[in-house]
Image (cartoon, rainbow, N blue to C red):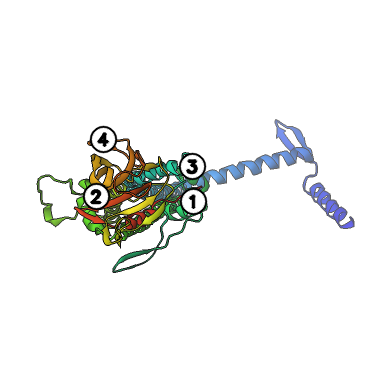
């Protein structure tokens, strides 16, 4: 505080010393006059003089160094303009690069999605073909369930193929038969699951773009989703191929169990398998039907489609084979082969299987076909013969009554007659024969194979 006062005193002392009251004397015509200048007036004039001198100095410097100042300003402007243009060029380059990447990504995305859509269409047709391939036996199983004693109309899952291929050998696949819990076995055979990713497989481009901070993240996420879809489609066709191959082996095993025809030979008899034609047009350059960029997928698709066609043809052929039992409840009294004749006691050949049942028991057709004979024939008594196609025929003897006539078309499990004791018979029973290519066969082999196709419930 004391030091501040001393400085103030010194300043006031300096001002009093410099700006004391002065007088200017003017003498004119012998007269003397004076002008008194107060300290304030002197201070104002001093300030004005200082301002004028400063302005003069500034103006002089501008006049002298005008060219240098203008040149410096021009250099600074050029530098700023160059920097701005360089920045604009970098932004334009980045934009062009991003736009190019966007176009490439868009083209790649469209190509990938088109490829996935084509695969999806092929898979949809394949699944439709697979569904239709199993419809024949499914219908037969439902019809079979209706004829079981005390059984109402069953659902599609009520009666199913009860078979499991444990191994294959020269004699065909080994079948393990069981009648326990057929629904679960059907699920094991028929069901397939595509393991889906944790998040949704639906691609929401807007959502991905909104969440990603950089365009590359959007592209990476879209590629990941497309890869997941492609993996799911590949998993689907792999599952269908595995199930189709297993189903084909099982159907071939059933045919092999009859011991009368080879499955491949039976396929050759199928009308749909041989119904092909058209002019021969050679492919340019020896191209494969399943060639191209998608050769692996297309070849697999073609292979599965061919196997599904074989499955459909086999099921159609099996549907016409006499595999079902003509009676629901019966007691086997005589087998196929040599036996002692019940009337004269001598050894003789028995061409069928005798199934004892009460009078009036309904006799069902074990397969669709056409009645070729219905009437009386010697020791057979009242007899019906049915042609099932593909070389298979069945004969039903000793009937008490007949519900069909020659030339009539019958469906699977239609009632064709009733058990009786007509002809050379010792009691009410059904004499059942199975013929293939004009040779009588063992009916028990067909019935045993049919047990792997149909499961009795109730």
Distance between the alpha carbons at the discs numbered 3 and 1 = 16 Å
Query: Which numbered mark, 4 or 3, is in the foreground of this view?
Result: 4
Secondary element under disc 4, as helix, strand or loop, is loop
Q: Position of residue 203 (x, y in %)?
A: 45, 45
Query: Which numbered mark, 3 or 1, is in the foreground of this view?
Result: 3
Q: Position of residue 293 (x, y in %)?
A: 26, 55
Give 189 or 35, whichever is nearer the viewer.
189
Q: Give the mark nearer the N terminus: 4 vs 1.
A: 1
Q: Give the mark nearer the N terminus: 4 vs 3.
A: 3
Residue 193 seen in this snapshot? no
**Mark 4 neighbour class, 10 Å CA radius: few under 14, some 14 to 19, many 20 or more:** some
- Numbered mark located on residue 392 in the image: 2
Secondary element under disc 2, as helix, strand or loop, is strand
- Numbered mark located on residue 285 in the image: none
Q: Residue beneath label 1, please?
A: 183
Indicate left or right for 102 with 17 as reference.
Answer: left
Distance between the alpha carbons at the discs numbered 4 and 1 = 38 Å
**Mark 2 neighbour class, 10 Å CA radius: few under 14, some 14 to 19, many 20 or more:** many
Q: Position of residue 94 (x, y in %)?
A: 39, 50
Indicate left or right for 284 with 20 as reference.
Answer: left
Q: Are marks 1 and 2 in contact (CB under 8 Å)?
A: no
Secondary element under disc 3, as helix, strand or loop, is loop
Distance between the alpha carbons at the discs numbered 2 and 3 = 29 Å
Q: Residue beneath label 4, please?
A: 405
Distance between the alpha carbons at the discs numbered 2 and 4 = 19 Å
């Amino acid at each position: 505080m004391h030091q501040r006062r001393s400085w103030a005193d010194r300043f006031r002392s300096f001002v009093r010393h410099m700006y004391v009251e002065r007088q200017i004397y003017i003498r004119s015509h012998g007269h003397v006059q004076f002008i008194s200048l107060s300290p304030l007036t002197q201070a104002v004039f001093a300030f004005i003089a200082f301002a004028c001198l400063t302005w003069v100095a500034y103006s002089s410097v501008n006049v002298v160094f005008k060219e240098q100042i203008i040149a410096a300003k021009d250099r600074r402007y050029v530098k700023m303009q160059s920097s701005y243009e360089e920045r604009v060029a970098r932004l334009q380059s980045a934009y062009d690069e991003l736009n190019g990447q966007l176009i490439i990504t868009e083209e790649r995305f469209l190509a990938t999605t088109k490829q996935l859509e084509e695969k999806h269409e092929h898979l949809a047709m394949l699944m439709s073909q697979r569904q239709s391939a199993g419809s024949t036996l499914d219908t037969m199983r439902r019809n079979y369930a209706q004829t079981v004693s005390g059984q109402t109309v069953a659902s599609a899952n009520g009666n199913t193929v009860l078979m499991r291929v444990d191994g294959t050998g020269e004699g065909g696949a080994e079948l393990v038969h069981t009648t326990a819990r057929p629904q679960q076995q059907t699920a094991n055979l028929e069901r397939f699951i595509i393991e889906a990713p944790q998040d949704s497989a639906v691609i929401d481009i807007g959502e991905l773009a909104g969440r990603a901070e950089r365009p590359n993240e959007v592209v990476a996420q879209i590629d990941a989703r497309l890869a997941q879809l492609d993996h799911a489609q590949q998993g689907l066709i792999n599952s269908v191929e595995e199930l189709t191959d297993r189903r084909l082996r099982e159907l071939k095993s059933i045919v092999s169990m009859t011991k009368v025809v080879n499955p491949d030979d039976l396929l050759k008899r199928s009308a749909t398998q041989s119904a092909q034609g058209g002019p021969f047009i050679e492919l340019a350059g020896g191209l494969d039907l399943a060639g191209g960029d998608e050769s692996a997928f297309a070849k697999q698709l073609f292979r599965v489609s061919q196997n599904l066609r074989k499955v459909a043809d086999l099921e159609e052929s099996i549907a016409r084979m006499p595999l079902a039992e003509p009676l629901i409840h019966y007691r086997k009294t005589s087998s196929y082969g040599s036996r002692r004749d019940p009337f004269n006691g001598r050894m003789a050949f028995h061409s069928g299987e005798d199934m004892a049942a009460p009078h009036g028991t309904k006799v069902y057709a074990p397969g669709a076909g056409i009645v070729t004979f219905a009437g009386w024939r010697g020791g057979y008594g009242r007899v019906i013969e049915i042609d099932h196609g593909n070389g298979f025929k069945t004969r039903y003897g000793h009937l008490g009554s007949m519900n069909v006539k020659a030339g009539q078309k019958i469906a699977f499990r239609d009632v064709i007659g009733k058990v009786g004791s007509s002809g050379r018979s010792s009691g009410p029973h059904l004499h059942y024969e199975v013929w293939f290519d004009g040779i009588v066969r063992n009916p028990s082999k067909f019935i045993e194979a049919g047990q792997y196709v149909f499961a009795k419930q109730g």
